[in-house]
Amino acid sequence: MSGTASSVQSSVSPVPPSAAGRQLLAELREIVGEEGLLYNADELLVYECDGYVVEKKIPDVVVFPLNTDQVVQVVQACNRHNVPFVPRGAGTSLAGGCLPVGGGVMITLTRMKRILEVNLRDRYAVVEPGLVNVHLTQHLKGTGFHYAPDPSSQGACTIGGNVATNSGGPHTLKYGVTVNHVLGVEVVTAEGEVLELGGAVEDLPGYDLTGLFVGSEGTFGLCTKVIVRLTPDPEAYRTMLGVFETVADATRAISSIIGAGIIPAALELMDQGIVEAVEEAYHFGFPLDAGAVLLIEVDGLEVAVGEEARQIIELCEQEGAREVRRAETPAERQLLWKCRKQAFGAIGRLSPSYCTQDGVVPRTRLPEILEFIAESGSRHGIRIVNVFHAGDGNIHPILLFDERNPEQVQRVMRASDEILTKCIELGGSVTGEHGIGVEKLSFMSQLFTPDSIEVMTRVRQALNSGGLLSPGKMLPTAGACGMEHIERSHPGKQAAS
Amino acid sequence: MSDEASPHNQSASSEATHSAAGTASGGTLAVLPSATGQQPACADGPITAGSGIDYGLFLDCVHCGLCTSACPTYLETGNENDSPRGRIYLMRSVVDGRLDLTESVSRHLDLCLDCRSCETACPSGVQYGRLIEPFRVDMQRIKAAESGKKSSWFQRLVLYGLFPYPRRLKWALLPARLMQWTGIDRLARATGLTKLLPRQLQRMQHLLPQLRQPAAQLPEVLPAKGTRRARVALFTGCVADAMFSQTGAATARVLQANGCEVVVPRTQACCGAIHYHSGAGDPALALARQNLESLLSDDIDAIIVNVAGCGSMLKDYGHMARELAPDDTAQIEQLEQFAAKVRDISEFLSELGPVAPTGSLPLKATYHDACHLCHAQQIRSQPRELLGLIPDLELVPLAESEVCCGAAGSYNLMEPEMSDRLAARKLQHIVDTGAEAVIMGNAGCSLQIQAALRDGNHPIPVLHPVDLLDLSYRGLPLSTITGK
């Protein structure tokens, strides 16, 4: 199985089927039926990339299993034929998490999307991996509970994908990331065995294998069921919009708020460039001349949130806020959040192409990194705008460019790399929530010592010894099928976080 | 390995001259020949599908995928090829020469309902309709060029020969009325006699609602009640006028009750949506001109429509003129003026400030958002607000109310399988609400949902918001309409 990953942008001549390939296809057809199978080039093409469009690779086959048993059989067939396989949900990954690096079989879980059980008294639900994140919360509407992790792509991304990348979202600051909301998973291993990790009961003994599995980016197994924690809806919200003259004032306000012991449910920063784009899209009435706005939300008991909101307004004003507005109605709150959640997509209105970076720095170093981003942008002649989860120091600088200008593209890549390297220098990391995927592979050796990488590699070998499952992901040394590293030719346009 | 020559191999080499980017193939494993046996539809023809589309419209899509879960067909199949992002990728790949317009590519594009829910979901403002509509028009042309026929018998006879003409439609419905009156229709259904009809006619017969007594033809001018607040022209449409003329009459009465003088010009025509969407540009433009002559005059404050599909077509006249006859600036200007005056009935009443209805209608009802209201015209709150004015009417939320019911113009007739799946999905949600009536502002949805309710043995009436408003203004009970 040679797995040269070639860019499909260049001319690719069709390779006739091998006898082994036909045999595998026949076996897959036996498992999922003709309607659960794609194998013609004109239907496979759309699976060559996800939300990360820089690197592309067409899978050889796409299968749509309907249940755990079919997943097991597909995985076993791949093992028999020594063919790589990779799971995919909605394909909203921004780091190429769904890229079928070695070609082979793509196991698309979008037809496994049932809600199997909702247990409000014990506060958990059991769902299939292909369920769209927001569909769970919609299903729970009126029960007084919701599913807390709310990545900006929650309207489309799947819970299985959230488990694979340990997704965050604006409400991460107070409620934690996906791993804090997954009680257990049913996993089909790389060899096709079914494991049940964790469970609906809290505080299980033994190794925390659920914790190990969440965020493994599909390299330890495919999850086929997820037991998620349900979170009670807060009794009350206060959502505010702080308007600041400069980004520096806004970041100081963030530190003051956290320093005062308040943990907002969300604390999001948008700079002038991004405000311009969302204002054009949604007409909320954002001030176009402000250097930055902070979207701040506190939630909890009615008696508490009023006092917290009062303190926040005071702190913002102390740090030089021009004004602090409050969302007066649920509709206003919803619109504010829509502006924030769809900010990335709205960038399409500013520039023909853009590249979203995902880095983390300690909260107190935010002013430094933002200054560095601005400086790097002007040095490389690239316009960079910012919208990010300020509360936990997770930055998303968005580099604007025109992909038809190759020289500009090179400058964008240099600026991106500089910014991420600076994040590491400041004691942070190169991804807050998008994951390593294939995009950030080259940073792993900067992030971790050789010993750490060696340990991670050993864990991976223990769970995915053949390397057939999700080759070329997460670890620079990963994959046992002689995968060549895919060269990045140009940054792509990306959206949503 | 290559013991069988794949047809695609041959076509790929012959095509290399005009396809610089190279045609996509399977991955390294190459399980099967690519694009098996399907001839490129436009290999030698003069038309490359989508080549006339402004390429910038493709570039607006940043491939984020936020549209996928808003797409009814993707919700059903989970296949990226059946999602908006996937369809844009397919179309762009055909334009780029990476893919041929194979049968399978055409299938996935045909399966699009053109419901525009992806446009609502898209944060980048991708104008999906501006991509899929011209692309499908090209597909039709290519198909016609291949088969040597301009259109199918069905399109010629039914879509072009019958639909645009309300009078012909009424005559055509006469046998159906007679059959329903005598009960022969049920007998024919029960005995399977209807199966002798061609498939698409069977579908049409199946869609026919229990036809209400047709309303008397509206006079050409109806006076305002009380002080005149506006003078409006009422667009009556073709299918709606033939099948739901009572709703047309109710619309006129509701407008009168709100102080509007209503003119109903007899010379008006079909909106042309069926023609335009099936690629028949010239007849569509001719119908637009006829409506312009008939409905627009300086002393008219608004042109009122009660069918979402027609309304969004009328509002699109300016763009259509720009697209089909870009050099005729006078025509573009006139049709833009026309389009600017078009209002859905709920939109208009909401802007005017509705007179509060007083008649009680104790009823638990739910509201379905027609795609051409909520996505194409962004009208969501107005109908709900109007219904909220009716004393004792309780409006309960409908899950997935903005997901297409599968009617989608002639989609029900052309794509029966997906249409039925979406109807079943809608039916389940309606039944789950426990509502005694379901309300919507589009004739196509009404036909589709009535048929689904009838098949599922759920005697839940399907009503238009103005049906209920009219009853409330007149102080009449629901049984006036339902007969129960």
Image: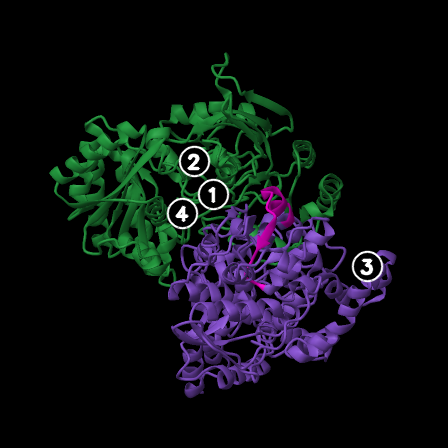
Chain colours: A green, B purple
**Label 4 sits on what residue type?**
Ala
Whichever of labels 4 and 1 marks the residue nearer the N terminus, that label is: 1
Q: Residue at x 38, y 27 (%)?
A: A450
Mark 3 falls within which chain? B
Within-10-Å neighbours for mark 1: few <14, some 14–19, many 20+:
some
Residues at marks 2 and 1 on the same chain = yes
Q: Nearer the viewer, mark 4 or mark 3?
A: 3
Of the residues shown, which amino acid type is indicated by label 2?
Answer: Ser
Element type at marker 1?
loop
Q: Quadrant of residue A407?
A: bottom left
Residue at numbered disc 3: B186
Q: Chain of mark 1?
A: A
Q: Which residues are magenta?
A: B427-442
Q: Is residue A14 visible?
A: no
Q: Amino acid at mark 3?
A: Arg
The residue to which callout 1 is attached is: A485
Q: Which mark is residue A496?
A: 4
Determine the secondary structure under disc 2: loop
